[in-house]
């Protein structure tokens, strides 16, 4: 996985923000730097830290699920994976980046209701499994795929 490179780029960005903060402070040695500049930097720092946490949670969940697509067996960049709920009736919430700020124990219990699949396999699952009633020429070809 490329978790280390993303983590390093986020750490680099945080250090660059720290350097920028000190540059702004050095440009205004005898007075307070403009608050608008400092507020903007604080927002960027918070956004980067939130991204780092979401990336970490995503990597942990993917590793917990085996780190490979359960259908095709391939390994991909973490952004390619989807968590497919086996039984949609048990689903409390979607496992995606917008929900990775929840408590990890809740994410872990939700992930246990899912299988880890790549985006392509996930689309095929929904396309062919939900439309079984359609009798098209390629249904026979896809029959053995699931």
Image: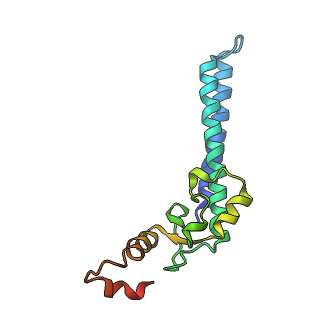
Quarter of the image that includes the C terminus: bottom left
Asked whether 94 or 19 is in front, the reply is 94
| Residue 115 image offset from top left, x and y in percent | 58, 73
Q: Quadrant of residue 42?
A: top right
| Residue 121 image offset from top left, x and y in percent | 45, 73
Residue visible at 32% across and 88% down in the picture: 140
Judged from this view, the residue extending furthest toward the left is 137
Residue visible at 57% across and 50% down in the picture: 98
Residue visible at 62% across and 30% down in the picture: 41
Q: Quadrant of residue 64?
A: bottom right
Location of residue 137 with respect to 59 vertically, above or below: below
Asked whether 111 or 9 is in front, the reply is 111
Location of residue 129 with respect to 39 vertically, above or below: below
Asked whether 74 or 129 is in front, the reply is 129
Residue visible at 38% across and 87% down in the picture: 143
| Residue 132 image offset from top left, x and y in percent | 37, 79
Judged from this view, the residue extending furthest toward the right is 105
Quarter of the image that includes the N terminus: bottom right
């Amino acid at each position: 996985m490329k978790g280390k490179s993303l983590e390093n780029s986020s750490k680099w960005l945080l250090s660059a923000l720290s350097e920028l903060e000190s540059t702004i402070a050095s440009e205004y040695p005898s007075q307070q730097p403009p608050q608008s500049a400092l507020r903007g930097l604080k927002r960027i720092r918070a956004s980067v830290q939130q991204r780092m946490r979401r990336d970490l949670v995503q990597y942990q969940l993917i590793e917990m699920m085996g780190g490979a697509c359960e259908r095709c067996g391939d390994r991909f960049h973490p952004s390619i994976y989807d968590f497919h709920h086996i039984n949609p009736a048990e689903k409390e919430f979607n496992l995606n980046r917008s929900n990775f700020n929840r408590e990890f124990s809740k994410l872990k219990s939700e992930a246990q209701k899912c299988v880890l699949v790549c985006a392509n396999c996930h689309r095929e699952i929904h396309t062919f499994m939900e439309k079984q009633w359609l009798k098209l020429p390629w249904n026979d070809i896809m029959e053995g795929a699931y």
